[in-house]
Amino acid sequence: MKSLDSFARTKLTALSDRGLKRDIVTTERREANHTLRQGRHLISFCCNDYLNLSHHPKVRQAAKDAIDHYGAGAGASRLVTGSHPLIRELEQRLAAIKGTEDACVFSSGYMANIGIIPTLVSTADVIFIDELSHACLQAGSQLSSANIIRFHHNDVSQLRELVRQHRGDYRRAMIITDGVFSMDGDLAPLDRLSRIATDTDCWLMSDDAHGFGVIGTDMKGSRHMFSPLPDIPLQMGTLSKAIGSFGGYLCASKVVTALVKTRARSLIYTTALPPASAAAALAALDIITTDPDYCRRPMKNARVFAQLLGLAAPESPIIPIIIGETKKVMDYAALLEQDGFLITGIRPPTVAEGTARLRLTFCAQHKEEDIHALVAAIKHHGIV
Ligand SMILES: *Cc1c(COP(=O)(O)O)cnc(C)c1O
């Protein structure tokens, strides 16, 4: 179709002119943050595999064994072929760790968020959502057709005021936030959000994609950074980051997970998680629940980096260096790549206009000498 290609070309050219065309570069991801791109070895400081568990021998072996026993694919939706025993075991393990009655495993974190939210709220309802919440929380909110009210990032007093003004106009209500913000690395004030939610009959949902495995008591995630533990009836997360595998989950009460399994379209109408991914996640959970010292390493590395550059103490293994201008960020990323570091520039619309940034993530197997070399390069180019 001529008009189709011509539309795509015009659109791409316009994006390209603003430095917003994105290219997916073929890059091999090897062990211990080593990557191979266009024939060059780079050390990655942008991966979410915080514990490097995707390459852990026990995790790999569990995935291989599952493929040998059960094959490579799941065959159909869990509601058609029945749930794989490994997926059910995974749900029980996640619920036990997170301290909820039950859990529901999805094929990814994105699938979880676009399935959970529309199951719980619709047109007569309202969602109060932190403006910096992950794209898939925003997408799930839009799909639900509920009225969406955004509050300023982590602004608890604004949220309290908005809830006071608007809660009464609606039937059901949710408050939605990242636990650890994916592009900023800071924590949500889950204790205070939980208090507002409890006082006003709003259902609090937190997305712990970047918390579980790396922060909180026993590495149980962002909720476990607070004492007493805040009440969060909807605890969502992913198996694709610190867990090193693939998939998403919701930990909640029995009745809520039962409703989600009956109604969430992104669970019902998509193929289940491959058995190998469930097996890998289970093996990773064994490591996370038994080796807290290893799990503390990403935070330790992030602290070393921040200290060397005089940056504020990090709250998670994610450290943003906000540059502002899109083109400048991409130039800095290219300079660091020449020095042997893989750090992708993050641009609008992933982050707000004027806040383009380098987003660094620290992992368990980063070596102290690599962090020192990175800091030297960042100083040398005058980035910080
Ligand atoms: C990565 C991410 C997701 C999506 O999880 P996937 O399993 O990768 O689909 C959801 N929420 C947040 C905050 C994330 O960073």
Image: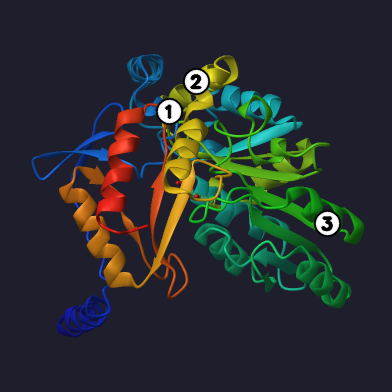
Q: Which residue is mark 1?
A: 364
Residue sitting nearer the eye, 376 or 211 = 376
Q: Earlier in the sequence, mark 1 or mark 3?
A: 3
Position above or below: 137 against 241: below
Residue under the point 56% across and 48% down = 112
Residue 4 occupies which quadrant of the picture? bottom left
Residue type indicated by callout 2 = Tyr
In the image, taking residue 178 as reference, residue 7 lies left or right, namely left
Residue neighbourhood size for the residue with mark 1, other residues' Cα within 10 Å, grouped as few (<14), some (14–19), many (≥20): many
Q: Earlier in the sequence, mark 2 or mark 1?
A: 2
Tell me whether the residue at label 2 lies in contact with that at label 3, contact meaning CB atoms closer than 8 angstroms.
no
Position above or below: 75 against 260: above
The mark found on residue 197 in the picture is: 3
- SS of the residue at dot 2? helix
Residue under the point 59% across and 69% down = 142
Q: Quadrant of the N terminus?
A: bottom left
Residue neighbourhood size for the residue with mark 2, other residues' Cα within 10 Å, grouped as few (<14), some (14–19), many (≥20): some
Q: Which residue is mark 2?
A: 294
Tell me whether the residue at label 2 lies in contact with that at label 1, contact meaning CB atoms closer than 8 angstroms.
yes
Residue 235, x across and y down, in percent: 68, 43
Residue 297, x across and y down, in percent: 48, 27
Residue 287, x across and y down, in percent: 51, 17
In the image, taking residue 154 as reference, residue 334 lies left or right, namely left
Residue 163 occupies which quadrant of the picture? bottom right
Q: Rounded to the nearest whole Å, what is the CA distance between mark 1 and mark 3?
A: 35 Å
